[in-house]
Image (spheres, rainbow, N blue to C red):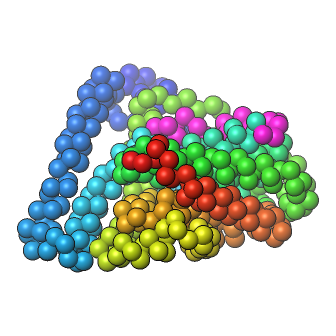
Amino acid sequence: MKEETTKLSAISPCACESPQPPSRRISMPVYLAAGIAALAVWWLVYERLEAVAAFFAYGVLGMKPSSHLGEAVFFFIYETPKVLMLLTLVVFGVGIIRSFFTPEKTRAILSGKREFMGNILAALLGVVTPFCSCSAVPLFIGFVSAGVPLGVTFSFLISAPMVNEIALGLLYGLLGWKIALLYAGTGLFVAILAGWVIGRLKLEKHIEDWVRELRVSAVDLEDMKMTWHDRIIYAKDAVKDIVGRVWIYVLAGIAVGAGIHGYVPQEVMASIMGKGNWWSVPLAVVIGVPMYSNAAGIVPVVEALLGKGAALGTVLAFMMAVIALSLPEMVILRKVLKMPLILIFIGVVASGILMVGYLFNAVVGLPFFVN
Amino acid sequence: MEIKVLGPGCSKCKQAETVVMDALKEAGVAANVEKVTDIMKIASYGVFGTPAVIIDGEVKCVGKVPAKADVIKWVKK
């Protein structure tokens, strides 16, 4: 067997994780330099976006600055490259983080953990573990068969879609760290609490029987060790994959945001989604639950709503309700969970979100949040 | 050669099947490719993430779409 001095794949044993190896090995310093240069270019372009967008909307297209259409068009032209650029950066960064976590590792960490400690760990892991909602069921089965308590499993299942790292990154980029932190904190809180409550209710008998009767041990592929080169490829592929799938939702979200920004008057927003009325939070949750949007797509809508003076708690509740519970996921979960458990799951999560909404409408006047 | 591609049917699972078919064509290897979508059957293989690929009874990949180069490597063995 001829020995190739430039063979890359010797370092990454697991077939799944190894990317197509390039013929020459790029060294770390080169990567670092390229990375810094790319970031610098990104930043320069990003800073100029607002000015360029204004030029385009008002100068080139001749829109009038305070007109409804003008505002909407400006919003759209400004936000589209802005959100897409931010999305690319965030997905890349998140990809690097995710390369450190796999469902198998998560399963190993959570098996045998007691309630509460387990709920907290599960919620935290749910945020960083790569999770495709079609693997919700295999994952669930895997957890249950590894002896992870039901409540802990649910904390994971709730935090994974609810505290979406991409949405987190976008919120940070568009609305600042306070709002991003709020979102992450309350999402984790709801995941931990809801999972714990479900655990306390002792609903194990509502798991479909065939799951509990499953007597298979998990197939464990050898531990994959990724080099930094592998991680960068992984993150790059994630950008291609996710941005490629999500850009259309983002555009739709921006279009909706543009409409809100340009056409909905401040008073209307304040009256429907303002703090003044008690029914805005439940309404937001009720509207949000049956809706499903990609997490990235909902962020521009959130931005527009907040910009128009909607109450923070109401908007947060709306956003969480939209992304935490999705009909496709419920349909899939029906294969492993009996109806009562699914309904309780939805109910507990919705209640948690409701609580968060009210809580934040109440505290938003406090100095910490006045941006 | 018996290849099973496991997945309930989301886009990633379909992608995995496409990658496997392409790899087989490129490698010039003939194999019987079966798509397993039933959750119960998938679980019975001890597989807890989808998509997944099993070749001749051996689990090769769990939880992600395999790279075509890797599939080619596996089928050529």
**Occupied quadrant, residue A62:** bottom left
Magenta-drawn segment: A96-116
Residue at the image point whose x is 83% and y is 50% from the top: A199
| In-front residue for pair A351/A330 | A351
Spot occupied by residue A214 in the image (x, y as percentages of width and height) = 87, 53
Q: In which quarter of the image is the C terminus of chain B?
A: top right
Question: In the rendered view, would you say A263 is above or below B18?
Answer: below
Spot occupied by residue A95 in the image (x, y as percentages of width and height) = 46, 42
Residue at the image point whose x is 72% and y is 34% from the top: A109
Residue A167 in the figure: left or right of residue A80? right
- The reply to whether residue A361 is in sight is yes
| In-front residue for pair A216/A182 | A182
Magenta stretch contains residue A292: no
- The reply to whether residue B66 is in sight is no
Residue at the image point whose x is 26% and y is 66% from the top: A75
Spot occupied by residue A310 in the image (x, y as percentages of width and height) = 45, 65
Residue A218 in the figure: left or right of residue A260? right
